[in-house]
Image (cartoon, helix red, strand yellow):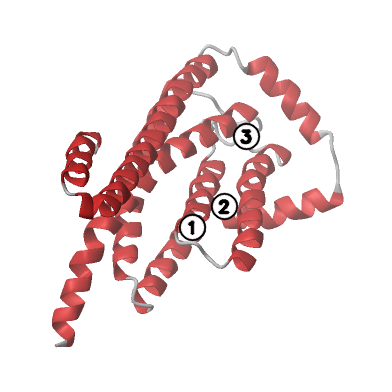
Amino acid sequence: MLTTLPGRFYRAVAKPERADVGIGLLRQSAKEAFGRRRYRVSGLLALALIVVLTLAVRSDDTAGIDRSVLAWITGQRWSFVESLFHGVSPVTRWTFHGATCLLGLVLFWVLGYRDRSVAILGAALVSGLVLYTMQLMMSQTAGQVRPVNYSGTLSFPSGHALSGFVVFGFAIFLMTHHSLNLKLRVPLIALAVVLTFASGLSRLYFVRHWPSDVAGAWLLGVLGLAVAIPVYLTLEKTLGPVMAKRESADSR
C-alpha cells in the first residue's frame, strides 16, 4: 500500500485540476496502511506475550500468582456479581456463539448486505483456524489442568473466555466500522465490553480456570481479532464492487 503513495502524489501534483482527488486518495491510502499496520503490530505483540505466558505456565512460574488471585476472587461474594456471572456463562459457549454468528450471516444476507455476510464468514473461518491451532498448541505445551480436577482436563487457555473475547470484540468492531446509530451503539458497546470481561472473570469466580488461563485466552483473543478484522476489511473491499455489479446486471 505504501508503495502506491508516491505515484498518487505525483499524479496529483502533475495535474493540478486533480489535486483534491489525489490528496484524498493519498490520505485514504495512508489511513488504510496505518490501520493494517496497527493490526499486524497488535497481533505480533499478542503472539510474543502468548509465547512468554505459555512457557511461564509450563515451568510453574505463574502458580503462586494464580493461587493468590483465585483465592481472593473466590473469597468475594456479591449477589449482583454472582447473578451476572450465572447469566453470562451460557452465552460464552462456542455453540451459542456459532448459532449467533449463523443468525447474523443470514440477517445480513436477507437485508441485502451480501458482501458483509461473505466477509464475516471468511473472517470467521480464517481466524477460527488460527485460534483452534494456537489453542491446541498452547494447551499441549503448558499442560496445565483445572483448579478443581475434572478428570485431569487441560485448562490453558480458557475456551469460554476466548470465545467471549473474540465474538464480542468483533461485534464492537462491526458496530464502530459501520457507524451504527449512536444511541444504539453506545449502550451495545458498553454491554459487549461487560460481557467480554465477565465471560473471563466468571470462569475464575466459579473455580473453572486459573487466572493464567483467562489471561492466555484474552491474549489469544487479541491475536484472533488481529487476524479476523483485516480479513473482513479485505473481503468487504474486494467483494463489494463485484456484488454491486452483479446485482446491477441481474436487475436489468
Amino acid type at circle 1 is: His
Residue on which the image places disc 1: 97
Q: Can residue 153 be seen in this view?
A: no
Secondary structure state at the residue bearing disc 2: helix
Residue found at the very far bottom of the displayed protein = 252
Neighbours of disc 1 within 10 Å: few (<14), some (14-19), many (20+):
some
Residue 177: x and y in percent read 45, 56
Quadrant (top left, top right, bottom left, bottom right) of the C terminus? bottom left
| Residue designated by label 2 | 92
Tell me residue 207's x, y (percent).
Answer: 69, 37
Q: What element carries label 3?
A: loop
Sequence-first tag of 2 and 3: 2
Q: How many marks?
A: 3
- Mark whose residue sits in front, 2 or 3: 2
**Horizontal side of residue 96 vs 8, given as left or right:** right
Which numbered disc flags the more N-terminal residue, 1 or 2? 2
- Measured Cα–Cα span from mark 2 to mark 3: 14 Å
| CA neighbours of label 3 inside 10 A, class few (<14), some (14 to 19), many (20+) | many
Q: Which residue has dot 3 on it? A: 209
